[in-house]
Image (cartoon, grey):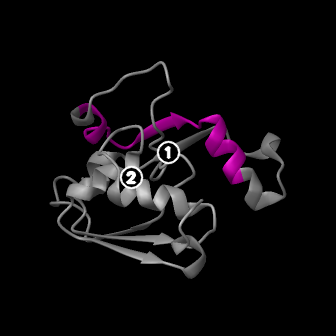
Amino acid sequence: MIEDLGGADICLGSLGYTGHIAFNDPPEPDEEISIEDFKNLSTRVVSLSRESIVQNSLKIGGNADIVPKKAITLGMKEILLTKKIYMYFMRDWQAAILRKFMHGPITPRVPGSLLQNHPFVKVIVSENAAVIPK
């Protein structure tokens, strides 16, 4: 339906520790996927990566046992069809992934990097996320 309507008007988001956007996690080290195939991933049910489970557990006291193991995620296809994308970086640990997102190579290994070719992405960065990592 999103595609039929010409894309959503706006998408608000951020990146996870691995550079994932929504739950579009990077491929595992032994997996390969082309940029084109990754860009065409659509809304679907996914199994969360260990990194996503741990990251989400930090919001609920660190108990990874109660984090759901599956999620419904908006696909990269639908995200990339969005007319305007606003990305927020607020946490200390986002300093490194922010730089990969903005300046690193475009690769499924950093899913958010695919937004580098989007015609409208506004990035909002807090002071602590703007610190250059050592």
- Magenta stretch? 37-56
> Alpha-carbon neighbours of circle 2 within 10 Å: few (<14), some, or many (≥20)?
many
Which labelled disc corresponds to residue 57?
Answer: none
Q: Residue at x 48, y 40 (%)?
A: 25
The relative height of residue 87 versus residue 46 in the rendered view (above or below) is: below
Q: Find disc 1 in the rendering and name its residue.
A: 72
Q: Cα distance, mark 1 to mark 2? A: 18 Å
Which labelled disc corresponds to residue 112?
Answer: 2
Which quarter of the figure has residue 105? Answer: top left
| Residue type of the residue flagged with mark 2 | Gly
**Image spot of residue 4 (x, y percent):** 16, 54
Which quarter of the figure has residue 84? Answer: bottom left
Residue 13: in magenta span? no
The relative height of residue 52 versus residue 35 in the rendered view (above or below) is: below
Tell which tag, 1 or 2, sits nearer the viewer: 2
**Image spot of residue 93 (x, y percent):** 62, 61
**Image spot of residue 64 (x, y percent):** 78, 44
Mark 1 or 2 closer to N-term? Answer: 1
Q: Residue at x 33, y 26 (%)?
A: 33
Q: Which of 50 and 68 is in front in this view?
A: 50
Q: Residue at x 52, y 57 (%)?
A: 96
Label 1 element class:
strand
